[in-house]
Image (cartoon, grey):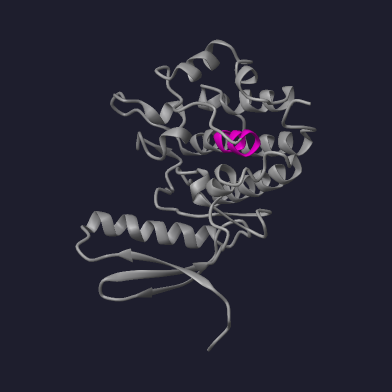
Amino acid sequence: VETNVEYAVKALDKAGLSPRQRRFQDREIELHYLASEHSNVVSMVKILESPECVFVVLEYCPEGDLFAKITEEGHYLNDEYKAKCVFLQILDAVQHCHSQGIYHRDLKPENILVKDNGWTAKLADFGLATRDSITSDFGCGSTFYMSPECQQPNPQPFACYSSAANDVWSLGVILVNLTCGRNPWKRASAEDATFKAFLKDCTFLQTILPISNELNYILQRIFTMDPARRISMAELRDLIVCCSGFTQT
């Protein structure tokens, strides 16, 4: 039946995969499918299989990803209302995932697709997602967006961290991307000079980014070193909704 609707197709090679690799592939498909009922998660339409591949038919987002919108087009820098709308959509998608017991673990602009001239955001790529609310998968994700606790180079035996709190940290970096068009630091580690300066002075970000006092407070709550004291998704949403301005006027 011809519908004249365009779809994206993700081809996952299954030839030569070990049983462990196949379990990871199955987990990605399952968790994306469970999350995709939310309007800000890329919809999973159908799954087709051949002897060599699994073909995942997905909603098509013709404008590409949020990274290109930010870095190549500077799309949200002079439109705080649009940046707020898009960030709230991303936050809502992640909050929905958490409510379903799904933790993305690789939140970054490259894994968020956009449409409607950048007004609509869709969370994608569940390749690193997990159902483990507490995990010992250190180094999981993309360095710019990882929380400090995720980056332990030599974790102690039985060490672990909160998957949800790690996602919240990643959202904070995305919020800086949207409002300032750059990252706050290269990695959240004491070896990074910019992050080290932030740890010494909680107002430091205002010396390198054009952010308002309100946004600086929100970022302080997100970038709290103790994951147990880090802001919750619900409170973060409330603060973003009530924020009167992201940048200095």
Question: Which range of residues does the magenta coloring cover?
Answer: 172-180
Q: Main SS type for the magenta part?
A: helix
Q: Where is residue 121 in the image (x, y as percent from the top left)?
A: 62, 53
Q: Position of residue 19 (x, y in %)?
A: 22, 58
The number of numbered discs placed on residues in the rendered structure image is 0
Q: Which residue is the extreme one toward the top?
A: 200
Q: Is residue 102 shown to the viewer in this render?
A: no
Residue 179 located left or right of residue 186 = right
Instruction: Identify which residue is drawn at 72% across, 32% down.
Output: 246
Say whether residue 72 is magenta. Answer: no
Q: Where is residue 79 in the image (x, y as percent from the top left)?
A: 73, 42
Say whether residue 175 is magenta. Answer: yes
Q: Which residue is the extreme one toward the front?
A: 72
Q: Position of residue 102 (x, y in %)?
A: 49, 49
Image vertical order of residue 171 relative to residue 7, above or below: above
Residue 3 located left or right of residue 126 = right
Q: Which of 223 and 211 is in front in this view?
A: 211
Query: Quarter-wise, where is residue 153 in the image?
Result: top left
Residue 72 located left or right of residue 147 = right
Instruction: Identify which residue is drawn at 58% across, 11% down.
Output: 201
Query: Quarter-wise, where is residue 139 in the image?
Result: top left
Image vertical order of residue 99 relative to residue 167, above or below: below
Image vertical order of residue 240 relative to residue 201, above or below: below
Q: Is residue 188 shown to the viewer in this render?
A: yes
Quarter of the image where the C terminus is located:
top right
Instruction: Identify which residue is drawn at 44% across, 27% down.
Output: 187
